C-alpha cells in the first residue's frame, strides 16, 4: 500500500476514491491511524466503508448489497435539464437516523470532516438525523451531500453540519439542501438557524440563500400588492430565525431606524428588488424544491 511519509504536512488521507471519483481532501479527518497514512483511501460509495486498497474495494463491491443510503426515502424528484438536450437528473433524499445506522453515519461524518476545518462530531452520531442527498441512476443512488440535524435541539438549530462533495460543489446542491432544511423547519412550525460557527463557504452559501429567501418574500408581496410586513411574517414564510432575518434586512437597507426614536421601520429599496428580479431570471436556474413532494412527518 503506498503510504505518505511521516513528515508530510498536508491533509490526511491526501486523497479518497468514492465510486469512480478520485477526490483531493482539504483537511485531516480522524480515520484510524493505519488508514489515514494511505496515499488514497477507498470508500464504498453506498455503505461508505473505507478500505486501504483498490483490490479490497473491488472485492467489497462484489459482496456489498447496498445501492443506496440506509434510512427512509423522504423526497424524490426528476429534474429536467435546461440545456434542451433532455438531460435529466433524479434527486432522492433520505432521512437516516444516527441511532439506527450508527456505522454509516460515523463514516459519513468522517468523510465530511475531510472538507470541514472546524471540529465536528464523528462518533457520537446517535442524537442526530442525517438528510442524505443522492442522484439516482440504474446503478443506484449516488451520494452528493448531506446535512445533519440534532433530534432535540433547545437552540433550534435546523442544521448542524452541511457538506456537498467537491465534484458537485457550485452546482446548486448546497442551496438545495439549505432550502430543504428550511422546508423541514416550516413543516415543524419552527424558525431555524444553522449551528455556528459557519465555515467560509458556509457563510457565503447561507448569506446568498438568506438574501434570496427574503427578496423572494418581498417579490411575492409586491405581486400581491401587499404592504403589510413584519419580521414575524418573513420568519413564518421562510422558516428563518428572526435574528438572521433582521441582519439581512439591515444589510439590504430594508430596515432603518426611525428618526428621534429607537424604533425600526421597513423601507423597501425598489432598485434592489428590481436588480434581484433581473438577476434571478437571467442566472442559471436553481434546483427546484417542491414542498408537495416531501413525504415526511416531524
Ligand atoms: N465562491 C463564491 N460563491 C460561492 C462559492 C464559492 N466558492 N461556493 C458557493 N457560492 C455561492 C454560490 O454562488 C451560490 O449562490 P447563489 O445561490 O446566489 O447562486 C451559493 O453560494 C450556494 O452555492 P451552491 O452551489 O448551492 O453550494 P455548494 O453546492 O457548493 O455547497 C457548501 C455549499 C455546502 C457550503 C459546500 O461549499 C461545502 O460542502 N463546503 C465544505 C464544507 C463546509 O464548509 N460546509 C459548511 C460548514 S457550516 C455548517 O455546517 C453549519
Ligand atoms: Zn459497501
Image: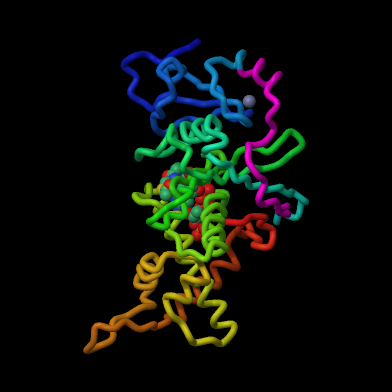
Q: Is residue 116 magenta?
A: no
The count of marks equals 0
Residue 273 relative to residue 200: left or right? right
User: Residue 10 sits in which quadrant?
Assistant: top left
Residue 110 relative to residue 265: left or right? right
What's the residue at 55%, 52% (across, down)? 177
Decide if residue 37 is in sight here.
Answer: yes
Give x and y (percent) for residue 21: 59, 30
First to last magenta residue range: 57-80
Outermost residue, left direction?
Answer: 260
214 is higher (above) or lower (below) than 11: below
Residue 281 relative to residue 10: left or right? right
214 is higher (above) or lower (below) than 18: below
Look at the image and name its color scheme: rainbow
Give x and y (percent) for residue 59: 66, 15
What's the residue at 73%, 39% (across, down)? 137
Residue 295 relative to residue 189: left or right? right
20 is higher (above) or lower (below) than 252: above
Q: Is residue 69 magenta?
A: yes
Give x and y (percent) for residue 163: 49, 43
What's the residue at 68%, 23% (across, down)? 64
Rendered-image quadrant of the C terminus: bottom right
Outermost residue, bottom direction?
Answer: 260
Give x and y (percent) for residue 204: 42, 54
46 is higher (above) or lower (below) than 193: above
Decide if residue 201 is in sight here.
Answer: no
What's the residue at 56%, 28% (across, down)? 22
Amino acid at each position: 500500500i503506498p503510504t505518505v511519509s511521516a513528515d508530510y504536512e498536508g491533509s490526511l488521507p491526501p486523497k479518497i476514491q468514492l465510486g469512480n471519483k478520485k477526490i483531493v481532501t482539504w483537511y485531516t479527518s480522524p480515520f484510524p491511524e493505519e488508514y489515514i497514512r494511505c496515499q488514497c483511501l477507498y470508500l464504498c460509495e453506498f455503505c461508505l466503508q473505507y478500505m486501504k486498497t483498490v483490490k479490497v474495494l473491488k472485492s467489497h463491491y462484489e459482496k456489498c448489497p447496498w445501492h443506496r443510503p440506509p434510512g427512509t426515502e423522504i423526497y424524490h424528484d426528476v429534474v429536467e435539464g435546461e440545456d434542451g438536450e433532455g438531460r435529466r437528473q433524479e434527486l432522492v433524499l433520505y432521512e437516516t437516523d444516527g441511532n439506527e445506522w450508527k456505522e454509516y453515519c460515523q463514516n459519513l461524518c468522517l468523510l465530511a470532516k475531510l472538507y470541514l476545518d472546524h471540529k465536528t462530531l464523528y462518533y457520537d452520531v446517535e442524537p442526530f438525523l442525517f438528510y442524505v442527498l443522492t442522484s439516482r441512476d440504474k446503478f443506484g443512488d449516488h451520494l452528493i451531500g448531506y446535512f445533519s440535524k440534532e433530534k432535540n435541539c433547545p437552540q433550534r438549530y435546523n442544521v448542524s453540519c452541511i457538506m456537498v462533495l467537491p465534484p458537485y460543489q457550485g452546482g446548486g446542491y448546497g442551496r438545495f439542501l439549505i432550502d430543504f432544511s428550511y422546508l423541514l423547519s416550516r413543516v415543524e412550525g419552527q424558525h431555524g438557524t444553522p449551528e455556528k460557527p459557519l465555515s467560509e463557504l458556509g457563510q457565503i452559501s447561507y448569506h446568498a440563500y438568506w438574501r434570496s429567501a427574503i427578496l423572494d418574500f418581498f417579490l411575492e408581496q409586491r405581486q400581491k400588492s401587499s404592504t403589510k410586513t413584519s419580521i414575524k411574517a418573513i420568519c413564518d414564510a421562510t422558516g428563518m430565525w428572526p435574528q438572521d432575518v433582521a441582519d439581512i434586512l439591515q444589510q439590504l437597507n430594508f430596515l432603518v431606524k426611525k428618526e428621534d426614536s429607537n424604533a425600526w421601520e421597513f423601507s423597501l429599496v425598489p432598485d434592489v428588488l428590481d436588480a434581484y428580479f433581473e438577476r434571478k431570471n437571467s442566472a442559471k436556474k436553481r434546483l427546484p424544491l417542491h414542498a408537495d413532494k416531501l413525504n415526511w412527518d416531524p
